[in-house]
Image (spheres, helix red, strand yellow):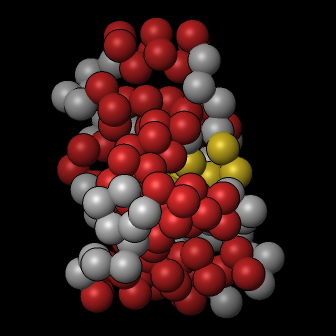
Amino acid sequence: MIKYKTVYVDVNVFLDFVCKHRDSLDKQHAKEVFTLIDFNKIIVCTNITTLAFAKSFLRKEYSENQAKQALIKALTFVQITPSNQKIVDEALASNFFDWEDAMHYYSAFHYGADCIVTRNTKDFKHSKIPILTPKQFIQNYLNNQ
């Protein structure tokens, strides 16, 4: 197995981590991924579209101020990948079915992420970097210790 150091988290994993009303197993796996940051074992990154979507979603569960505070807290340990014209152009020209997934992929790719962690692995079938579920990522990490 390969050891992954820089991990791009898709929006669904980010939401599993920051939202209180998510499926318990998905939330647990996301929490395990993010826990590795606390031990300086991995770098977690995501892009600005994740934050925009998360902010809208958090407003369904929290007040405006609580939603902002949740994002501020998450940003203390999550790095933001670039979003620029090159990434937009590549996403638009790609074979990805969903443009948002293409934006995630090219943002992760250009940032140098070692893998993308998502619950929707099928959405990244055109990826040139490994795509793992949170559970697969944790199993991989544990197998490399």
Q: Can residue 68 be seen in this view?
A: yes
Q: How many marks?
A: 0
Closest to the observer, 55 or 120: 55
In this rendering, position of residue 65 left or right of residue 95: right
60 to 143, vertically: above or below: above
Q: Which residue is drawn at 37% across and 56% down?
A: 59
Q: Which residue is drawn at 37% across and 79% down?
A: 20
37 to 92, vertically: above or below: below
In this rendering, position of residue 57 left or right of residue 39: left
In this rendering, position of residue 118 left or right of residue 140: left
Outermost residue, right side: 40
In this rendering, position of residue 64 left or right of residue 74: left
Q: Quadrant for residue 80, please give it.
A: top right
Q: Where is residue 46 in the image (x, y as percent from the top left)?
A: 56, 48
Closest to the observer, 141 or 29: 29
Q: Position of residue 88 (x, y in %)?
A: 47, 16
Q: Where is residue 135 in the image (x, y as percent from the top left)?
A: 38, 79
Q: Quadrant for residue 69, please give it.
A: bottom right
Q: Quadrant for residue 75, please give it.
A: bottom right
Q: Which residue is drawn at 77% across and 84% down?
A: 39
The quarter in which the C terminus is drawn is: bottom right
142 to 49, vertically: above or below: below
Closest to the observer, 135 or 10: 10
Q: Can residue 136 be seen in this view?
A: no
Q: Which residue is drawn at 44% across and 50% down?
A: 55
